[in-house]
Every structure is written in C-alpha cells, then in structure tokens.
Image (tube, grey):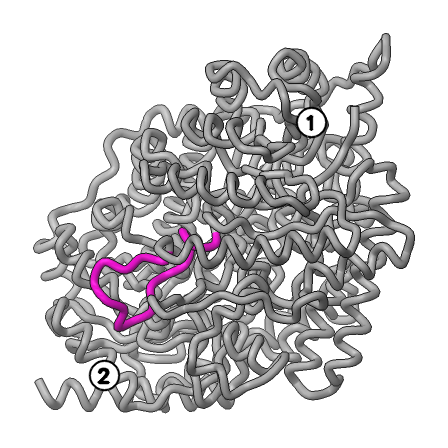
Amino acid sequence: MKTTILGYPRIGARRELKFATENYWAGTIDAAELETTAARLRREVWTELRDAGLNTIPSNTFSLYDQVLDTTVMVDAIPARYRGLDGLDRYFAMARGTEEVPPLEMTKWFDTNYHYIVPELTLDTRFRLTGGSTAKPIAEYLEARKLGIETRPVLVGPLTYLLLAKAAPGSPDGFVPLDLLDSLVETYAELLERLAGAGAQWVQFDEPVLARDLGAREFDALRRAYRRLGGLASRPKLLLATYFGSVAAEALTEIAATDVESVALDLVAGPGNLETLASIGGMPRKTVIAGMVDGRNVWRSDPARVRSAYAILLGLADTVELSSSCSLLHVPVDLGTETALDPTVRERLAFARQKVAELVRLAADLRATNPQVTTLSVAAADADVRARLDALGDARRSAREIRFAAQQAKLGLPGLATTTIGSFPQTAEIRTARADLRSGRIDEPAYVQAMRAEIARVIRLQEDLGLDVLVHGEPERNDMVQYFAEQLDGYAATESGWVQSYGSRCVRPPILYGDITRPHAMTVAWATYAQSLTDKPVKGMLTGPTTMLAWSFVRDDQPLAETARQVALALRDEITDLEAAGIGIIQVDEPALRELLPLRKDDQEAYLTWAVGAFRLATSGAADATQIHTHMCYSEFGEILSPIADLDADVTSIEAARSHMELLPYLQAAGYTNGIGPGVYDIHSPRVPTSEEIAANLRNALHAVPAGRLWVNPDCGLKTRAYPETVAALTNMVTAAQTVRLSL
C-alpha cells in the first residue's frame, strides 16, 4: 500500500510567496530574490513530504501565479500583444495586464474558488516546447533530484488545457481550441522524451475535465492523445489524474485501452467512480490511485469508508495506492498553528500537512491486522432554527413592474446609474487598526472611531466623484465571507488558514461546523452611519448564502441545501433590520453561484433549485420599494442564465470587462428583464482604463440592455487596488457614463 498526493499548497505556511511576489511587483526586490524565495518554498515542500513518509512526491506543482498560465508559457501559446515583453514582465503582463495591454481572461478552476488564466488560442497557434531541456517541469524535477528526492512532474493534460481555452477574438467561425490537439500532443511528446532523458520515472497528467459531460469528439480526442503519448518509445510511466467528480464509463474505457500505467480517481467528490470502474470490468493491468482523503475540505477522513472502498478496489485493479482526492492546493497548509480553535471543532479537522500524515496513517491501518478505530464527533443541531425554516412558505416578492415603480418613486435614479460593487481599497492604516484591535493595542471604541473616519472619507470621495449610489467602503471587513462568519454562531475562524485564490490573492475560508444562527445585527451600525453622511442612497452590503458556503469549509454531515437555508434565514433577518434602519438598497452578493454548479448536467437542476431558493429566502421579505442588488464575478455564467433571472434581484452586476461584454445578449435571450450592471473595467489589473474605453463598453452594452435598466460599475470590489488608480478609474467611469447619457 503506497501513498501519494496530487499536489500541495505553494504559497508557504506564512504566505511567503504572496509577499515576495507583491514586493517584486512593487520593485522592492528583483527577480533573483523572488526566485530565491520560490526555490526555498519548493525545497521545503519536497523535504516535508519525503520526511512525512509519502512514497511518491509530485513536482512542478509550484507556480508564481497559475499552473495553466505556466502551461501557456511552456508551450509558447502566447498572444501576439505580449510578444514585445520578456521573462517575468511578459508572464505577469498576461496575468495582470499593464498600462499598455490588458490581461488574459481569468475564471474559476472548475467548481473551486481557485482562478486560472484562460489560454487565448487562434487557428494559427503553433505549440512548441520553450526552453527545451530547461523547460520548467524538467528544471524543477532536476532541482528536487539534487536534494536526493525523486519526484513525479505534474502537467496540465492536453484535453483539459484545450477545453478550458478560448478562441481568440476574430477567430474564424467554427474554430475551437480542440482543433489544435495534435500539435499540442506532439509538444507534450517532446517534453516526455526530455523528461525521460533527465531520469524521470513517472509523469502525472491532470485531466479534471473528464469529470464534465463530454461528447464523442472529446472521447475521441482522449483516445488519440493518450494512445500517442502512451505509445512513445522513450517516456516515463504515465499517471492520468482525474478529480472533482465521477468520470464517465466511456472515458474510463478509453483510458483502459491505452498504455497509460496508472489512473487517479476522486472517490470523495466522485463516489460513483467505484461503480463505473466495476461496470467496465476494472483496470486489471493498471494501478488505480484511490483519492480517498478530501483535497478540498478540512474534515478528517472516515477510516471505515476508506477501508470499504479499498476492499472493492482490490478486485478492480492490478495495484491500488492511496492519495488525496485532488491537489491539496485548496486547503490551508497547517492546522498546528490554530491553537485558538474550539477543541471539539479542531479534533475533526485536517489541513494539508495533517492530510499527508493521515494518508500515511490510513495506509498503515490498511496493512494492519487490527486497524486503529477512530470515532469523529458530529455537530449539535439547533431546534429553533430548524423549526423556523419548517414554518416558512414559498419565498417570492411582488412582480418586477410593481417593485420597479416603487423603487423609482423612492430613489429617483437616472438611467446609466453609477455605483461600485462595495469595497474600497484596504489601506495600510485600515489593516493596522484591525491588527491593533486584535492584539489589544487599541480598544473597540478607538477601532470604531478609525473605521468611521474611513467611511466618512469614502463617502466624501464618492460624492466628489459624482457617483449616484454610494457604498460605505467596507473598511471594517477582513473578507466578504469571514466577516459574516465571525458574527454567526455555527462558524469558526482560523488565524492562518490561508488558501490561494488567484496569483498573490489569498483568502482565509471560515469553517462552518454547526447549525447557523445570527445572535445580533452584523452590518446595520456601519450602513446607517454611512447613510447619515449623505443624501444619496447608500447600499447595505451582504454576502449571499451560496457564496457563504462556497467560500467556506462546510460541514459534510448534512445536505448543502439545508445548510444554505440556515444561512439564508440569518441574512433574511439582517435585511429586515437594514430596511427598518432606513437603508433603501441592499446588495446580496452571490459571486460563487456558478462556481458551485455541479460539473455533470444531471446534478445541476437540484443544485440550482436550492441555490436560487436560498437567495429568495434571504431576500423575499424585503418591501417592494427596497431595491435588492446582487453581484457575480469571474465564472463562466453561460450555463446558468435562467437561474440568474430566477434569483429575481432588482439589479445584477456581473463581471464583463475581460470577456468583452459577451454575456449580455445571452442574458437577454434567457429572459432577464431586471437591471444589469456589466463591469465596465477590470479591477484585477492595475491598468487604469480611459473614459473612451469605458464609454465604448457602455455603448456595446446598450445594444443588449436599454439605458433605464443599465447600471455602470467596475466588475468587482476595489479592495485590492490602491487609491490613486481607484480614483483615476472611477473618475473616467463617471465621465464615460455622463458622456453616453448625453448622447442618448
């Protein structure tokens, strides 16, 4: 019984990569110092995994920004607009943009909160292996071998890379990136031959796309790609890793027919993989890597479930090895630092470091005659919460026309109303005040005074800029989910449970371990103070129930639908309190609605039913004159256009800048008739757009949305930006809106 993992966090236990990367961007360190930090982090991970007792260790899982972007650079699929740059300048320009060129599109990695940089391919794209024998996977393999550690290089598989890529604007009709399969496979073939020459014994191809619904063309591509790669005369052994769900029988059949030596199956997110594997007669000549330790959640594994699945697998494969269900990239690094957690919660948890130890221990138990038996505690139920939910009926508001008339009478907003998504830059002074409160250097009244001063500054700034609907800027919020989790019973917060979201951006997902209750109002004091400073409407800002689940580590002992309704009930009470305090616009953000969508269509209807129902439960108690907004960002929303309309928010703001407003006509075709705020500029890039560019985006949007329903806003919150670029961009945004208004 051997053990492995499919990947490991790369940010460092203390987020060393984040700080080094941001220092490089700021010009306070050079490329050599950044690489020194990166090399140290790689070395620490490899030695830690070796010392923990893992039998095989992955490499090439490290990235300065994103593994898909790394692949794009490795195979030289670099769009022409970046060709004038070199090295890290080009790499980070593709991820973040510059003043001269916008970045590549960014979206969610399957149904996770990790974001990848979308490849942009053309019919003329010609793949080649950049660097030859010094290509990144080879260099990192040799780097580990110098330490005496044999590793298994990990590559984004050719199907996943091409099926996640997009055709560049202006590509001929009918072109899809999968048309480039043969060229990409030949590039991978060269890489495999070079890795074999360097001494690599195994290579891992990540193909999570196989957990999606695929058609005949994709199955044919799978067959062609891995028969070609498996048939190479000189190559390492191949592990084809699937994860995030169940794999279709057709895909497993195709894999079984190739010379690939091993296949990894996710038995946490895809328990049906066992039945499917049995239905095709197993894989008697291959090794099955059984993903039984959850790589996406923080709960300890159930040894009884592991033993049961292992017993079944023994009859279906030549060899069975134990692994994480997917890369451990999606969980925090080390539980050992979380000394403040409630012991009854802590004993149920395992972060990346503990999951590795758990794998080794589970493997030992499977070999033992009398395995160790572990009993895990379960969460207590709150009878009052469950009784209130049982008593609630259908969650619906009045018809849109009635609401629209009431809101116009109350708010009197112009067409092309301008606003922002919610957060303003989190300055060093704000972060210092929060840290001082935690450490006891200042007391609660002093902290409140500091936050009120920042809110007053943000309100004055927005009035000076000429925005129509204001926000309080959220200076008191560390994170849009954690802030609420810290005020809800049933949630626990960590001190250093950081997880990479994109690039240098890390989040600290809270842990939802029990039934949810709201002991007190969470946002009313801040919102009412902000509203007292201005005659313009100020939005109350909440995070929606589905996003509260998606960006947390959620209990796995009851259905997600039930947990979502508990969170929605707490938000419903908060909306009632905001409304009673005089807040006329309330935004309930659901950026993760698309993110949690199951990868298989057969599972999607049930999910969308409870996700839409939870949003309506949270918002349906609002009066007709109260305008409900929602916000969504950085996901492919094409598959959930009707559910977005079914949310029945009065206004939906949505990321659209990087995707060139491509969603709007489809949203209209799906029957969406409420207000829409397509993001008119990309806040994840430091580049400041001109007013002419924003005006062009607005005119483009007006082809699909009439001015009376079109809102003008950035595509996401401004928390990560600096004030100079924020003020410049918002100034240009308001100017563009005024210019287009005058032209109507």
Amino acid at the residue labelled 2: Ala
Badge 1: how crowded within 10 Å, few (<14), some, or many (20+)?
many
Residue at the (48%, 78%) spot, across then down: 685
Q: Can you identify the residue that label 1 sits on?
A: 301
Relative to 640, does residue 455 appear above or below in the rendering?
below
Q: Is residue 167 magenta?
A: yes
For this view, does 36 lie left or right of residue 415? right
Q: What element does badge 1 sit on?
A: loop
Q: Can you identify the residue that label 2 sits on?
A: 696
Q: Quadrant of residue 129?
A: bottom right
Residue at the (66%, 85%) spot, across then down: 26
The percent position of residue 722, horizontal first and vertical second, equals: 54, 83
Badge 2: how crowded within 10 Å, few (<14), some, or many (20+)?
some
Q: Nearer the viewer, residue 507 or 343?
A: 507
Amino acid at the residue labelled 1: Ser
- Mark 2–mark 1 Cα distance, whole angstroms, equals 53 Å
Report the span colored magenta.
161-177
Q: Earlier in the sequence, mark 2 or mark 1?
A: 1
Task: Locate the N terminus by quadrant.
Answer: top right
For this view, does 125 lie left or right of residue 145? left
The percent position of residue 234, horizontal first and vertical second, equals: 68, 47
Q: What element does badge 2 sit on?
A: helix
Q: Is residue 716 magenta?
A: no
Q: Nearer the viewer, residue 480 or 258?
A: 258
The percent position of residue 353, horizontal first and vertical second, equals: 78, 43
